DNA sequence: AATTTCCTCAACCGCTCTAGG
DNA sequence: CCCTAGAGCGGTTGAGGAAAT
């Protein structure tokens, strides 16, 4: 007993779209819109296609103002930063890049950008192994990751590692993966803040390109309109009476958000998060930070290391979450 | 020139989420 | 509340082209 198919597979055409099909679909949507019902749409137009297929074709290819290929370095930066912060939430990442589709970004990441980065990481690793083979052995043994660590999370950790290595190659914490999962993120934050400050003092671009910081900061600041300020202001403020804003590298805080949201997810309340101005509020009226403290009090540790969760659902047209991205390239 | 291997990206699959009855 | 249909999303696949042998 499986799930009922969304359409009659036998009478549905699959595979690449012909130009005629494209024209039919585009003309219809241009004139009448989707009508809010993709499933019914192909029948109205006389297309032997699944509604989902029509939707995908429209969103990824036929929709106006779609850009294909030719990602700029700025786009690379944004993708990388958001990937590190929130993982493979392609639709959210795509929302930050006008004209780009989630599918496009996903493909670009999987086929090019990731390799570009990991290529640099291999270079770094080779240098490291010459410099310190002992430490690497320990590290390799410890790299046998917990099975509950998703690939996405691992990849993000790897990228963090790379960023940190490139910036601060001798940072023992980042070279010692065994430390990561064992520390509760809340505890981790105090440790990593030191590294964070250090790391953010130098200009850096993981792709090895020159970064126009001013430009990027402007762009990235636009992205940074939600959770990061939430986190930095609510949390850092509580820890730092002087309320000194520290641009941060994202590692610890990101993980804290992950854990927080994983906790909430596990409790089935994450859907109830809403963005209220610069802070999130639970529907019961308590701030998420107070909720976090409460959760922290109740739970001894959080074992979930799944991919990041970002608060993204709001009503139509509202752009959500976003941030996060305690962008890597901020210089102080 | 022929064959094999690698790479890219459009499209599909199956799952979760959401809204409406 | 519960159920269901449709929308949306992320992971995966495979056809076709490019590069290597």
Image (spheres, coloured by chain):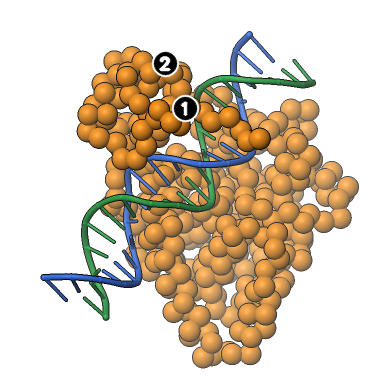
Chain colours: A orange, B blue, C green
Q: Is residue A173 above or below residue C15?
A: below
Q: Which mark is residue A8?
A: 1
Which of labels 1 and 2 is toward the front?
1
Local SS, label 2: loop
Can you tell which quarter of the image residue A164 is in? bottom right
Can you tell which quarter of the image residue A46 is in? top left
Residue denoted by label 2 = A35
Distance from Cα at disc 1 to Cα at disc 2: 21 Å
Q: Residues within 10 Å of mark 2 (few under 14, many from 20)?
A: few
- Depth check: give the residue in front, A199 or B4: B4
Q: Would residue A22 appear left or right of A33 to someone viewing this image?
A: left
Q: Would residue A302 appear left or right of A180 to someone viewing this image?
A: right
Pointer 1 chain: A
Percent position of residue A9, x then y: 45, 31
Taking the spot 30% from the left edge, 32% from the top edge, the residue there is A62
Taking the spot 77% from the left edge, 56% from the top edge, the residue there is A303
Sequence-earlier tag: 1 or 2? 1
Pointer 2 chain: A
Taking the spot 59% from the left edge, 60% from the top edge, the residue there is A151
Percent position of residue A309, x then y: 63, 45
Percent position of residue A214, x then y: 39, 54
Are the residues under badges 1 and 2 in a single subunit? yes
Q: Residues within 10 Å of mark 1 (few under 14, many from 20)?
A: few
């Amino acid at each position: 007993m499986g799930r009922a198919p969304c359409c009659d597979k036998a009478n549905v055409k699959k595979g690449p779209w012909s130009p005629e099909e494209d024209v039919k679909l585009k003309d219809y949507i241009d004139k009448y819109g989707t009508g809010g019902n993709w499933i019914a749409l192909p029948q109205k137009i006389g297309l032997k296609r699944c509604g989902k297929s029509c939707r995908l074709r429209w969103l990824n290819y036929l929709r106006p103002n779609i850009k294909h290929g030719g990602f700029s370095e700025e786009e690379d930066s944004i993708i990388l930063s958001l990937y590190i912060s929130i993982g493979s939430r392609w639709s959210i990442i795509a929302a930050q890049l006008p004209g780009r589709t989630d599918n496009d970004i996903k493909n670009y990441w999987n086929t090019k950008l990731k390799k570009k980065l990991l290529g640099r990481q291999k270079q770094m690793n080779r240098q490291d192994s010459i410099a310190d083979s002992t430490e690497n052995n320990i590290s390799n043994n410890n790299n046998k990751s917990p099975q509950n660590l998703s690939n996405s999370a691992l990849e993000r950790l790897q990228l963090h590692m790379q960023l940190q290595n490139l910036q601060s190659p001798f940072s023992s914490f980042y070279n010692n993966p065994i430390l990561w999962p064992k520390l509760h993120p809340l505890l981790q934050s105090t440790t990593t803040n030191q590294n964070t400050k250090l790391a953010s003092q130098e200009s850096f671009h993981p792709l090895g390109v020159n970064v126009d910081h001013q430009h990027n900061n402007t762009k990235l600041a636009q992205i940074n309109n939600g959770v990061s300020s939430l986190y930095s202001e609510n949390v850092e403020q509580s820890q730092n009476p002087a309320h000194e804003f520290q641009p941060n590298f994202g590692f610890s805080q990101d993980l804290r958000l992950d854990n927080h949201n994983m906790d909430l997810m596990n409790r089935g309340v994450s859907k109830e998060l809403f963005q209220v101005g610069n802070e999130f509020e639970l529907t019961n009226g308590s701030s998420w930070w107070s909720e976090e403290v409460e959760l922290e009090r109740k739970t001894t540790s959080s074992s979930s290391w799944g991919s990041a969760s970002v608060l993204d659902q709001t009503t139509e047209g509202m752009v959500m979450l976003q941030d996060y991205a305690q962008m890597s390239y901020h210089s102080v």
